[in-house]
Image (cartoon, rainbow, N blue to C red):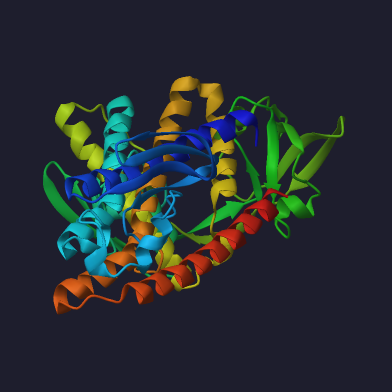
Amino acid sequence: MDFTSILIAIVIFSLLVFFHELGHFLAAKACGIGVIEFSIGMGPRLFSFKKGETRYSLKIIPFGGSCAMVGEDAAGGGEVGDSDLDEIPLEELPDNAFPKKSVWARIITVFAGPLFNFILALVLGIIMVACIGTNPAKVYNVTTGSGAEKAGILNGDEITEINGTGIGMGYDIVLFSLSNPIDGQKEIEVKFLRGGEEHTVRYDPSRQVFRTGISYTADENPAMLSEVTEGHPAYEADLRAGDVITAINSVPIATGSEMAQYFTENPIDGGPLEFTFKRDGKEQIASVAPEEVTISELGFSAAYYREDANFFTAISGGFKEMLFGVKSVFASLKMLFNGTASVRDLSGPVGIVSVIGRTIDESSSDGAFYVFVNMLNISILLSANLGIVNLLPLPALDGGRLLVLIVEAITGKRLKRKTEGIINMVGFVLLMALMAFVLVNDVIKLF
């Protein structure tokens, strides 16, 4: 985690928070609600100025922000007397106070924050699609011997549905695979378009393959093993993570790409493989007998296909990128509830900075353009995530406040301000506790 990663993360977080609070700010102004302070960051002020009734502040901790409105509970504006407004009876509040406005004005103001995060995700999505093209779910590889090949799926087919789950873009297939494992399924159903006509096929996703239990990166660096799975043939033959492969069956291997090319030209068929490798500067040889295993797979690749975009497809493609970000949040929540993932898998600012750092390291060799595109992609996901999470009906979040306001709109009865303040305070404490847990968890992951 270097300074560049931290700096880029701060820029991204600041952009997301700025747009979120800008939504609240512009809606408040449009609804005639006074804004005491519009701030980016938390803690003591680094810089501020006042224009009209509003103080604009940049604060020392570069995460978070606020749009403190007149009469809003726990506004935190920092101006003398402002913190006492929530104790004043409603009828005595200034006309521009948040609680004194109509319920619909308050709903619009609260909802505008998350809405602006979706708008930002859409804009960034359009920019990304304009840079690298749209992402239709078009098949670009069918695995030899797979159920997909036997069912007749061909390169160029556009996938529209898998097991009843709609596929709107290539990335949706990744999301489907993460949240809907197909292990053990006897049959899967795939719908696709070919020549404008929809076709439906059903096939057994399982097949027999031979594996050694090694992992590596197919790039232009030396063919270093990144992982050797314990209990598998390569591990039993004494290969370990960090070993650098220099030859396979006497064929010289200089890079990870050459290693991948070797296996493409010489598919593993159960015959013994002789790996020549270097460990601690010494060359050694390991004989590995691949094991036969049953795997379940879709049998085709269609997730990362890209097509050049025009003005109209850039807009529609940007919308799909934003929608993918939204769907990924719901998929993550589903995985939390069904036990596929746990709260320990959650990441906060430290974890996100770590992801940004790894992404920069992995894409920097391809050039600044690809670093920029990857940062756009991360920003889209984070902005959609921020919008959805803020809409969750939990106290201290915009969604919790919206729930109270919607109940008020339906029943015509306003919740007591003191009661609402207590609910928000309890929610805030619980939210801070969760953030502290995630922070500690992030730090543990680093080590």
Q: 140 or 62, which is in the foreground? A: 62
Residue 199, position in %: x, y? Answer: 17, 54
Nearer the observer, 190 or 84: 84
Residue reaching furthest left? 196
199 vs 40, left or right, is left
Q: What residue is shown at x 27% (from left), y 36% (from top)? A: 123
Q: Which residue shows up at 32% across the image and 59% down it?
A: 71
Q: Nearer the viewer, residue 127 or 388?
A: 388
Identify the image quadrant of residue 246: top right
Identify which residue is drawn at 11% across, 48% down: 197
Q: Quick check: 141 above or below 391?
A: above
Quarter residue 356 falls in = top right
Residue 236 horizontal/vertical position (percent): 78, 55
Q: Residue 382: where, in percent of width, then height? A: 41, 46
Up the image or down, 98 lies above or below 366; here it is below
Q: Position of residue 298 (x, y in %)?
A: 38, 55
Q: Is residue 143 visible?
A: no
Where, quadrant-wise, is the N terminus in this rendering? top right
Side (left or right) of 398 relative to 211 = left
Q: Quadrant of residue 139?
A: top left
Q: Would you place residue 84 above or below residue 280 in this image?
A: below
Whether residue 41 is visible, yes or no, is: yes
**Residue 396 vs residue 199, the one in the foreground:** 396
Q: How many marks?
A: 0
Q: Left or right: 382 with respect to 350?
A: left
